[in-house]
Image (cartoon, rainbow, N blue to C red):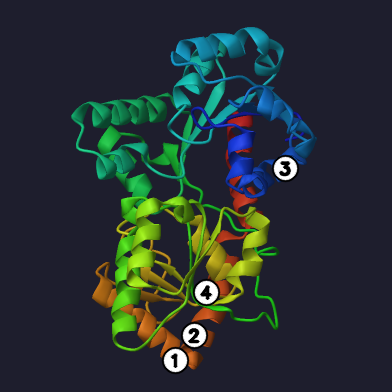
Amino acid sequence: MKNLALTFFFTAGVGLRDWADTGSLERELELYRRLARKLKRINLVTYGGKADRLLAEKVPELNLLTTRWYPRQELTTLYLSLRYCPQILGSDILKTNQIRGSQVAVWIKKFYRKKLIVRCGYLHSLITRKRTDDEKRILEAVTLERTAFLAADVGIVSTAWQRDMVVEDYGLDPDKIRVVPNYVMTEVFKPQEGASKKYDLIFIGRAEKEKNLDGLLKALHSLKTDGKEVSLLLVGSCCDNAEIKQMIKEMRLNVSLKGNLPNFDLPKVLNQAKIFILPSHFEHHPKVLLEAMSCGLPCIGTKVTGIKEDIEHRQNGLLCETDPRSIAEAIDTLLAEGALRETLGVNARKYVRKKYDIERILEMELEIIQELGEG
């Protein structure tokens, strides 16, 4: 393994600065820091240009290949090939972060005849279908995804249902697509004894329609109408959404906003809440849910794909439907039953430590790298 070099391609247009601005830099890079101790070298292809080079000191163990994302991806590929030819030639394996941007890695694989791992945490085709009816955009997403998986020596998805979907949709060899889940640093995301519970609920994330934040706020308004005021802490880019802010104001809800926080600051705020809630209409493999479970929080999630696979109702969490009434009932139930909250929190942490601890995921990644390196 010490003789193998890996080049990792960021998502299209994304750089280290983007990860730093959203607070996810440390979380996203931790796996590659640990891989770097096992391999000869890891190169990171990032698209933040000069801004990324200024962050190089944050990742001394990783070799940055920084560029910008050109409107024509052929130019991105050409620039990388010319400027970083020795580093790419010296790589044994290429790996993508997501489907978006994978075309650059596919072209470089073909030109340099390298092994390629196409990894995606979410299915680009599926999320595009969920967010738009534009047939052109959907076709572009499907074509990009199909091309990437067909070109890959190994494809990585984060859940078994994603694996089944791409195998069927693109006629792939089932042995070629592996399930490597998202990881949690359980030594960081853990219960904090004696933490003061300042909030009844906490939600962390974006404000896209699929997150169903309006359903959550309507549920809180319903509870308030019944004389049960529930406090909620919102963390992340959802705090910048004008519609969400307006709903909070009009309904006079007890909601606090914190905005984006560094990932390693999240355990502290998670431990300040009694319950974590994820009321989404759909998910893929939500890291924030796993991190909340790892902190020993009792979690409420909707009974949808991407959540129901990890929450077993009344065993390690609580499931509800996506409508405000069902969400309100789940909140009311869990706030009223302290013993149930305690049981669900303990079981949630045990579950995540067993399935998603970063050291387990590291071993899965290393197995695939070793397999390709020896092939």
Is 68 left or right of 178, judged from the image as shown? Answer: right
Inspect the image, locate mark 1, and give the three-letter code of the amino acid beneath it: Glu
Measure the alpha-carbon separation of dots 2 and 4. 10 Å
Is 7 left or right of 13, judged from the image as shown? Answer: right
**Residue 333's quadrant in the figure?**
bottom left
Q: Which residue is mark 2?
A: 341
Residue 14 seen in the current view: yes
Classify mark 1: helix, strand or loop.
loop
Q: Earlier in the sequence, mark 4 or mark 1?
A: 1
Q: Is residue 54 above or below residue 276?
A: above
Foreground: 192 or 255? 255
Pick the quarter of the image with the N terminus: top right
**Residue 115's quadrant in the figure?**
top right
Is 306 left or right of 187, judged from the image as shown? Answer: left
Q: Which residue is mark 1?
A: 337
Q: Earlier in the sequence, mark 2 or mark 4?
A: 2
Inspect the image, locate mark 3, and give the three-letter code of the amino acid beneath it: Arg
State the image coordinates of residue 319 (x, y, percent, origin top left): 35, 74
> Residue placed at 65% from the left, 17% from the top?
88
- Bin the neighbour count of mark 2 within 10 Å (Cα to Cα): few under 14, some 14-19, many 20 and up: many
Tell me, yes or no, whether the two marked residues, 1 and 2, touch with CB atoms within 8 Å: yes
Tell me, yes or no, whether the two marked residues, 2 and 4, touch with CB atoms within 8 Å: no
Inspect the image, locate mark 2, and give the three-letter code of the amino acid beneath it: Arg
Residue 216 seen in the current view: no
Measure the alpha-carbon separation of dots 3 and 2. 35 Å
Query: Disc 2 vs disc 4: which is toward the camera?
Result: 2
Classify mark 2: helix, strand or loop.
helix
Q: Which residue is mark 4?
A: 348
Q: Which residue is mark 3?
A: 33
